[in-house]
Amino acid sequence: MGFFSKIKNAFKKTKTAIDNKLLQIFSKGELNDEFFEELEYVLVSSDIGATASEEIVEKLRAVASKQKLRNQDDVKVALRDIMVEILQQNPQPEINYPLVLMVVGVNGVGKTTTIGKLANYYKNQGKSVLLVAGDTFRAAAAEQLTEWAKRNDVKIVKNNEGSDPASVVFDGISSAKAKKYDVVIIDTAGRLHNKVNLMEELKKVSRVVANNWEDACYKKLLVLDATTGQNALSQVEYFNEAIELDGLVLTKLDGTAKGGVVLAISQEYEVPVMFIGTGEGLEDIEQFNATDFVEAII
C-alpha cells in the first residue's frame, strides 16, 4: 500500500465529513456567506486550526469570486490548490550524506518507534545506519532501541542508564566518522517542552553534533503525535526556539483524523513536515507529499 492509500485510509472520516458538508451546502444552489462560514467550521473541526482555516476560506472566497466558480468539483479543486500552496511554502530541506538526524519530542509520541522506522527507511535505500542511544534517563530506553537495531540489523552505540547523554552522542559521532556511516540517528530523552533544564541539555547534545562533525548534514526532527491536534503547535514553538528544527515527523495518523494540524503548523511556523507515520509496521513511514496529503482530506 502506497503513501496515498495509507493517508486516504487515515483521513477517511475527515474526507467524508467535508464531502458531506460541501454536498449539503451546494444543494442550496449558491456560494454565499453561509457556505463559507460552514466550510470554515468544518475545517476547524478537522483540526486545521482557526487561523489557518480563516486564511484558507478567505483565499477560496477570492478565487471563487474571480473565477466565478459555481460547480462543486471546481470549488474542491480550488480548495486543494490553496491547501497545497500553504504546505509547500516551507520547502523540504536538502539532504546530503553523511546524514545525522537528532530525533526529539515529548514523552509518548512514538519517538523510538519512529527511529526504528527511519532506520529501515534509509537501510532500504542502501545506506549504512548507526543508532545512538542518547536517552539515558528512561528505564530500558537503550534496550528498546537495541531491539529496533536488531530488527533492522544495524549497529547501535549506547552506555549505562544515567550516563551523560552528550557523552554518549560524542562516542556515537566519533564511531560514525571513523567507520564512515551514511546515516546516524540519535535518540533523545522524551521531555516536557516547557522544562527549561531539559531543553538546555538538548541544546548541549545538539552542540556536540554540530561541533564534532562539521562535514555532516545535520538535521533536527521533532516527532508529533497527530492525536494531540492543536496542542502540537506549542511543542513546535518550544523545540524550535531551543534547537531550530529542520523538520517534523507526524505519527499515529492511522488512528486519528486530526492530521489537519499540519496546515496550522505550516501557516504559523517555517518548519516542513518531512515524514509521516501511517501505521504500526516497520515499513509504515513515508516522505511527506503535500499534494497526496491534501487529496486525502478534500
Image: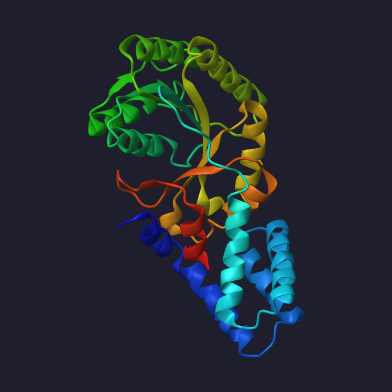
Question: Which residue is pictured at 48% across the width and 69% down the height?
Answer: 13
Which residue sits at x=44%, y=37%?
A: 111
Residue 26, compared with residue 152, is above or below; it is: below
| Placement of 121 over or under 39, stated as above or below | above
Between 42 and 191, the one lying in front of the other is 42
Question: What is the quadrant of residue 53 in the picture?
Answer: bottom right
Above-or-below relation of 175 to 197: above
* Residue occupying image coordinates x 31% and y 12%: 179
Q: Is residue 158 left or right of residue 245?
A: left
Residue drawn at x 66%, y 79% is 69
Residue found farthest to the right: 33
Residue 250: x %, y % from top left = 49, 46
Count of picture labels? 0
Which residue reaches farthest front? 67
Colour theme: rainbow
Residue 231 visible: yes
Assign the N terminus to one quadrant of the image.
bottom left
> Percent from the top left, x then y, of residue 290?
51, 54
**Where's residue 239, x and y in %?**
62, 33
